[in-house]
Amino acid sequence: HEGNFVVNLGDMLERWTNGRFKSTLHRVIRAKSDDRYSIPFFYEPHFDTYVECLESCIGEEGAKYAPITSGEHLIGKYKETHADFKV
């Protein structure tokens, strides 16, 4: 739609928000011959940052994701996409 602005959120923010904000598949597909621009910007917390559900996002069901460090999370994601990866 004309003038729309889309923000794709990553897996880390989904963990922090207990699934309130969903991670999206990161890809750009040109459905038409019109120009489309994608300017990716990736930002991650420090490798040792402790990531756990934000208190304001915990509902009656509790936290959906176990606490983890940013580094552990990133290494896990890398292992999911690179079968030959070894730490």
Image: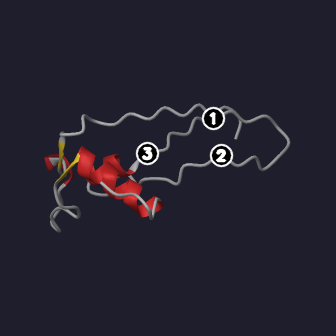
Q: Residues within 10 Å of mark 2 (few under 14, many from 20)?
A: few
State left or right for residue 17 relative to residue 50: right
Residue drawn at (16%, 55%) of the image: 67
What type is the residue that disc 3 sits on?
Answer: Leu
Q: Distance between the Cα atoms at labels 3 and 1?
A: 14 Å
| Label number found at residue 16 | none
Depth check: give the residue in front, 15 or 61. Answer: 15
Amino acid type of the residue tagged 1 in the rendering: Ser
Q: Quadrant of the N terminus?
A: top right
Which residue corresponds to mark 1?
38
Q: Which residue is mark 3?
A: 9
- Mark 2 — residue? 28
* On-image quarter of the C terminus: bottom left
Q: Position of residue 75 (x, y in %)?
A: 32, 52
In front: 72, or 63? Answer: 72
Task: Tell me which numbered mark, 1 or 2, is placed earlier along the sequence.
Answer: 2
In this orientation, which residue lies closer to the viewer: 77 or 5?
A: 77
Residue at the limit of the structure toward the right, as seen here? 33
Q: Is residue 35 above or below residue 57?
A: above
Q: How many marks?
A: 3
Residue 84: image quadrant is bottom left
Q: Are marks 1 and 2 in contact (CB under 8 Å)?
A: yes
SS class, disc 3 = loop
| Label 2 secondary element | loop
Return the x and y of residue 68 as percentages of the image width and height: 19, 53
Mark pair 1, 2: CA separation: 7 Å
The residue depicted at 15 percent of the width and 66 percent of the height is 60
Query: Along the line of sight, which residue is nearer the eye, 72 or 39?
Result: 72
Packing grade of label 3 (10 A; few <14, some 14-19, many >=20) is some
Dot placed on the residue nearer the N-terminal end, 2 or 3: 3
Task: Determine the residue positioned at 66% across, 31% down.
Answer: 3
* Image x and y of residue 10, in percent: 41, 47
